[in-house]
Amino acid sequence: NVPGQALVLINSPEIKQWSEAAAARICRNHSDFSERLDEAYRCCFQRMPTTEDRELAATFFAGGVNTTSRWQSFVAAMFAATEFRLLD
């Protein structure tokens, strides 16, 4: 579990495909930013986002960019996160 693993994941064709599919579903089913964020966390981490998670996401989506392609990048980063890759 090293930083290189996250880089390999985030740049892999499979993660790109999976994150595109997840982002498309999230954006198709929800129009509200908060609902999209909740769904992304349920999908990726099986939990609701914390206050800190919400603040980080707000920074990532600053400027009102709430497009499917931006959500694809966000979900891809979630897939590469340690929380996604490891079991407690």
Image (cartoon, grey):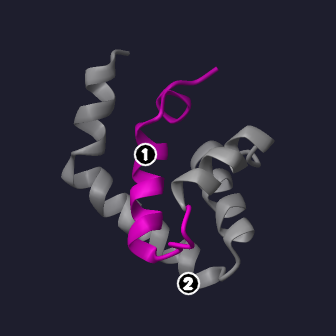
Which of the pair 57/14 is nearer the observer?
57
Tag of residue 77? 1
Residue drawn at (58%, 52%) of the image: 59
Residue 15: horizontal and vertical position, in percent? Answer: 31, 51
In this view, 1 is above or below 29: above
Magenta span includes 84: yes
Q: Residues within 10 Å of mark 1 (few under 14, many from 20)?
A: some
Please tell me whether the stretch drawn in magenta is mainly helix, strand or loop: helix
User: Horizontal placement of 50 versus 26: left or right?
Assistant: right
In this view, 20 is above or below 80: below
Residue drawn at (23%, 34%) of the image: 8
Magenta region: which residues?
62-88
Residue 83 found in image quarter: top right
Quadrant of the image containing the C terminus: top right
Residue 85: horizontal and vertical position, in percent? Answer: 46, 30
User: Horizontal placement of 34 versus 60: left or right?
Assistant: right
